[in-house]
Amino acid sequence: MQIEKIRGEGLDAFFQGVLKLETLEECYAFFDDVCTVNEIQSMAQRFQVAKMLSEGKTYNVIEAETGASTATISRVKRSLNYGNDMYGKVFERMKEDEK
């Protein structure tokens, strides 16, 4: 697992802080304080790419709709296939919230 390579007290504290956010507005404000606009947009783009890949969309469609490069799409696909399956868990929880 890649997680062990990044795990540490500082990151634990950061994630514990993220888990304390309660609203969408708090998330916007917190990540605006913590990240640059480009960093936020990159994370959002990767998330959108992962969602589209999980829905079976093609690279061409994803590239056209998100502006993501094929290299980014490939990296996200690798995470979907060989990662920690957290995109899938998040997408499933989001579907449950829609019900």
Image (cartoon, rainbow, N blue to C red):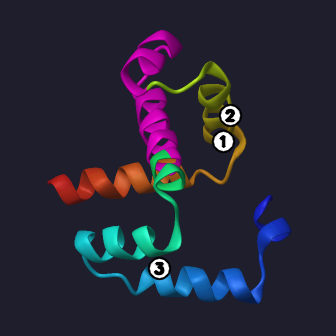
> Mark 1 sits on what residue?
79
In the image, what residue occupies the spot 25% across and 56% down? Answer: 96
Q: Tell me which amino acid carries mark 3.
A: Val
- Label 1 crowd bin: few (<14), some (14–19), many (20+), radius 10 Å: some
Q: Tell me which amino acid carries mark 1.
A: Ser
In the image, what residue occupies the spot 46% across and 24% down? Answer: 67
- Label 2 crowd bin: few (<14), some (14–19), many (20+), radius 10 Å: some
The spot of residue 41 in percent (x, y) is: 45, 47
In the image, what residue occupies the spot 33% across and 74% down? Answer: 29
| 4 with respect to 51 (left or right) | right
Query: Does 61 appear above or below 71?
Result: above
Q: Which mark is residue 75?
A: 2
* Mark toward the start of the polypeptide (1 vs 3): 3
Which residue range is magenta in the image?
42-66
Residue 25, picture quadrant: bottom left
Q: CA distance from mark 3 to mark 2?
A: 25 Å
Magenta part mainly helix, strand or loop? helix
In the rendered image, the quadrant that contains the C terminus is bottom left
Local secondary structure at mark 2 = helix
Magenta run includes residue 58 = yes
> Mark 3 sits on what residue?
18
Query: Does 77 appear above or below 59?
Result: below
Q: Which mark is residue 39?
A: none
Local secondary structure at mark 1 = helix
| 15 with respect to 90 (left or right) | right
